[in-house]
Amino acid sequence: DTVVHAPRFYHQFMNAVPGALLTYDLPDLASALGDRVTVVDPTDALGWSEKESGPVADPADMKPDRPGLTGIFYGSPNFSNPQGGDVLQSGEMAWPDATLNRGHDWAVRWRGSLIPESTGEITIGVDSTEGASVRIEGREIASAEPGGRVSTGQVQCESGKPLALEVDFVKPGTNPEPSDHVNRLHLRYKRGDGQWQTVPAGWLHHSRQQELELEHLLR
């Protein structure tokens, strides 16, 4: 470890091809050190471990036991040009343009599970300063447009039972905005004719498998 010590990284083609590196090659280094080298969690040339690249997912990785929804931030409003990972941590978020540094046209798509704590029918809605939509079990339930138009929908819930959830937030960049503009997203729900409430953070979860799938998309 006095020769090379670095965190794991991806697209390791040069490390895997003898002669590609000017100073040393990891295959040659490992061969020279022999049994003094211990290989831990080996990866292929793309940085995937055997577990991550295997065709069968670990059942434990499928469980939605991680907080929030996991997603990808895109550098365009049409969900192209992926820039990195993002987590929606609660049902109500605000991102000031001054501190976000994402420009004026971008989008985020989060996914995970909605795990309500009660049984019965609830109405789902979404408010946003930009464009937003909510899909549950693949069906669009609610949406909001920059002009203020919103739609809501009903979903049948069972306490503790995960429902596949996907949330899109789109900043189209079509209109000039003041420097102190704040981008807002508000996921709401209500039971019957009751009052609207913010979707609790404790209802939003994702799985390790979903994290791995998004990592695939970002490589």
Image (tube, grey):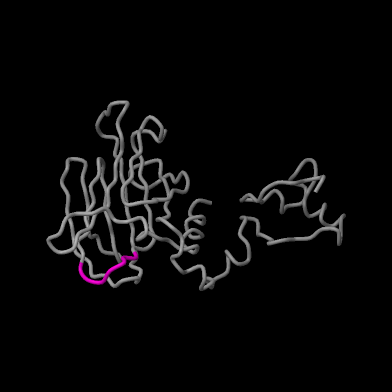
Q: Where is residue 154 in the image (x, y as percent from the top left)?
A: 19, 64
Q: Residue at left 77%, top 41%?
A: 22
Q: Where is residue 89 in the image (x, y as percent from the top left)?
A: 39, 51
Q: Residue at left 77%, top 46%?
A: 4
For the residue pair 60 and 214, the one nearer the viewer reads as: 60
For the residue pair 90 and 166, the one nearer the viewer reads as: 90
Q: Does the magenta stretch include residue 166?
A: no
Q: Residue at left 22%, top 60%?
A: 141
Q: Is residue 208 left or right of residue 162?
A: right
Q: Is residue 3 left or right of residue 176?
A: right
Residue 167 in which image quadrant: bottom left
Q: Where is residue 64 in the image (x, y as percent from the top left)?
A: 43, 65
Q: Is residue 146 left or right of residue 49?
A: left
Q: Which residue lies furthest to the left in this view?
A: 193
Q: Position of residue 135 (x, y in %)?
A: 28, 60
Instruction: Write the start and end of the magenta stretch as one range.
Output: 115-121
- Magenta span: chief secondary structure: loop
Residue 48 in which image quadrant: bottom right
